[in-house]
Image (spheres, grey):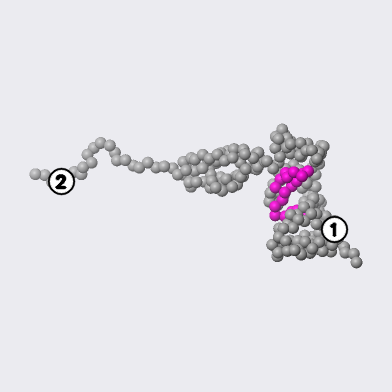
Amino acid sequence: RELDGGRRQRVGIARALALHPKFIVCDEPVSALDVSIQAQVLNLLMDLQESEGLTYMFITHDMSVVKHISDNICVMYLGQLIETCKSDELFENTLHPYSKALLSAIPTVDIHAEKKRIPLKGEIVSPIDPKPGCRFAARCPYATEECNKHTATNMVKVKNVVGKTEAAARADLAGLTIKVKYKESTKTPGLVISQSIKENEVVTKNTTITLTISKKKETTPETPPSGGNTEPPSGGGE
C-alpha cells in the first residue's frame, strides 16, 4: 500500500531516530509537502527536539520554514557562507544583499502590506572555478573593490560595548584587533567609556578598534601649609 507524502516523511523521521542520534541532518524534509502537512511535520520535529534533546542541521530554500524552526541561521550562496546570525536577527536586521533578496521573495497573505521584491541581476559566477572574494559581488548593487578581496565571512558587524568590562567587550568584538587606552574618570573603573568604531558598522576582520576604559582617578594626599609655627602655644607666665 502506498503512503502519502506526510506519512513517508514520518517514516523517514522514525528511521532516523531508530539509532537514538543526537545530531540529525534534515535536507529539504518538507519541500515536497503541502503547507498543512509541512506544519505537522515541522511541529513533530520540534516536539522531538525538545523531548529527545536533538540538534538539527536544517537545509532548505524556504525562508518561512527557516524562521519557524531555527535558532541560528547560516545563509549560503554558491557554496560560500555569506551571513550567520541568530534567527530573529536575520529577519530584523539583515545585512547581506543576497539575504535581503531571499527575504523579499517570501510571499505574504496580507494584501495591504507593501512588499518590494528585490530582483537579482548580473551573471552568476562559475561555481567550479570561482574568483577570489565574495561570489555574489557580480550581482550585488553595493559591490566595491573590497568585495573582490574579502569574502562575506571576513566581515564583522561592530557591536556597542560601551559600559561593559574589557573581557566582555573583547568577547563581543571577537575577530577585531583590540587596542586599549585607559583614561581617568569618575565613572566605575574598568568599564569601556568609548569606542573608535560606531555600532553596526561593518568592517573586515582584524580591523583595529580602540577602546577607552575608565581608570580610577588618582587623588593626591593633602600636605600641611608651609611656614609658620606648628608648635602649640605655651600657656601661663611668670
Q: Position of residue 17 (x, y in %)?
A: 76, 63
Residue annotated with mark 2: 235
Q: Amino acid at mark 2?
A: Gly
For the residue pair 217 and 4, the one nearer the viewer reads as 4
Q: Quadrant of residue 30?
A: bottom right
Disc count in the image? Answer: 2
Q: What residue occupies the far front of the structure in this picture?
A: 19
Q: Identify which residue is drawn at 72% across, 55% down.
A: 70
Q: Is residue 167 above or below residue 40?
A: above
Q: Identify which residue is drawn at 73% across, 37% down.
A: 133
In the rendered image, residue 91 lying in the magenta stretch gets the answer no
Question: For the residue carrying disc 2, how many other residues have a C-alpha within 10 Å: few (<14), some (14-19), or many (20+)?
Answer: few
Q: Give the left or right position of residue 175, taking residue 186 as reference.
A: right
For the residue pair 215 and 45, the one nearer the viewer reads as 45
The answer to whether residue 29 is seen in the rendering is yes
In the rendered image, residue 69 lying in the magenta stretch gets the answer yes
Residue range corresponding to the magenta coloring = 65-84
Q: Mark 2 or mark 1: which is in front?
A: 1
Q: Which mark is residue 231?
A: none
Which quarter shows the N terminus? bottom right
Q: Amino acid at mark 1?
A: Asp
Q: Give the left or right position of residue 29, taking residue 177 as reference.
A: right
Q: What residue occupies the far right of the structure in this picture?
A: 1
Residue annotated with mark 1: 34
Q: What residue occupies the far top of the structure in this picture?
A: 145
For the residue pair 227 and 84, the one nearer the viewer reads as 84
CA distance for labels 2 and 1: 108 Å
Q: Identify which residue is drawn at 74% across, 54% down.
A: 57
Q: Position of residue 158 (x, y in %)?
A: 63, 42
